[in-house]
Image (cartoon, rainbow, N blue to C red):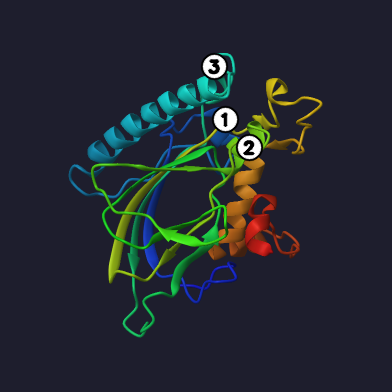
Amino acid sequence: TEKGDYADEVNRSYEAFDLGLDLPADDPDYLAGNRLLGPNVWPDVPGFQETVSQYYTEISALGGIICGALEMYLKLAPGTITQHMTKPISQLRLLHYVRQPHIKDHQSVNMGAHTDYECLTLLHTRNQGLQVLRKDDTWVDIPVDPAALVVNIGDMLEAWSNGLLRSTPHRVLNLSPERFSLPYFVAANYNTIIQPFDALVSDTQPELYLPFMAGAHLERMLIRDFLYLRRLKTRRGAAQADPIHNPFEQRLNQ
């Protein structure tokens, strides 16, 4: 339980298991110190690694299919997006939110309003609590359907599409005593430079986003979101940085 940096968040109460593309211990990016690539650390729970690894593989393949469909929707050449996902920094989170007993206001916020930082989020959930911000700046509850996946647009896809697709602000309320969800974040390769595709820039639609590196953006946002990463950075001698802001969350700052 901790207080996050989101303005609407009273406290954040959840537990999570995070994993990424399971790479060997001699992976050169991992050996070079990349914090987003490397082998996963698996708990000693019978069947856990096999089951979760299979889910990661299948949801990752689905993410590729959806990105291929978005290439068609945006009238981009096949592979324009997916060619940048050969060694992605995609993460899967196994989340268990808990409403603390002292929380009497069940409309209060557990996870504050934010966008996701990657291309897409494919979310499986079994409990109420997720809300998304509509174009008219009102919050709407997302229906719970265990047979379906919620698909949110992320920051990287907003920039790639030059704003044709907008990153989805969302938050989690304390509607349920506990809430389980499995978000899979479809991301690009670490070193991919994210900027509007040339085919989506024109005289009538100028380039709206400055280039940024996919891995650097994700790392900055994770340091903002997780206190233990900020503490780790400070212990390693890094100077206290100014507050980190996400330019894709401007709607939330107004």
Q: Position of residue 244 (x, y in %)?
A: 69, 59
Q: Is residue 229 something that shows in the picture?
A: no
* Mark positioned earlier in the residue sequence (1 or 3): 3
Q: Which residue is mark 2?
A: 214
Q: Count the marks.
A: 3
Decide: marks 1, 2 in contact (CB < 8 A)? yes
Query: Which one is nearer the viewer's eye here, 5 or 242?
Result: 5
Query: Which one is nearer the viewer's eye here, 143 or 58?
Result: 143
Q: Position of residue 174 (x, y in %)?
A: 37, 71
Query: For the point 30% across and 62% down, which residue is it?
Result: 179
* Mark positioned earlier in the residue sequence (1 or 2): 1
Query: Which one is nearer the viewer's eye here, 137 or 175?
Result: 137
Tell me the tag on residue 79: 3
Query: For the point 76% across and 63% down, which residue is it?
Result: 242
* Mark positioned earlier in the residue sequence (3 or 2): 3
Q: Amino acid at mark 2?
A: Ala
Query: For the point 60% across and 56% down, which residue is it?
Result: 223
Query: Which image quarter holds the N terminus?
Result: bottom left
Q: Amino acid at mark 1?
A: Asn
Q: Which residue is mark 1?
A: 189
How packed mark 2 is, by other alpha carbons closer than 10 Å (few <14, some 14-19, many 20 or more), is: many
Question: Marks 1 and 3, how far apart in space?
Answer: 14 Å
**Side (left or right) of 205 relative to 87:** right
Query: Which one is nearer the viewer's eye here, 76 or 85?
Result: 76
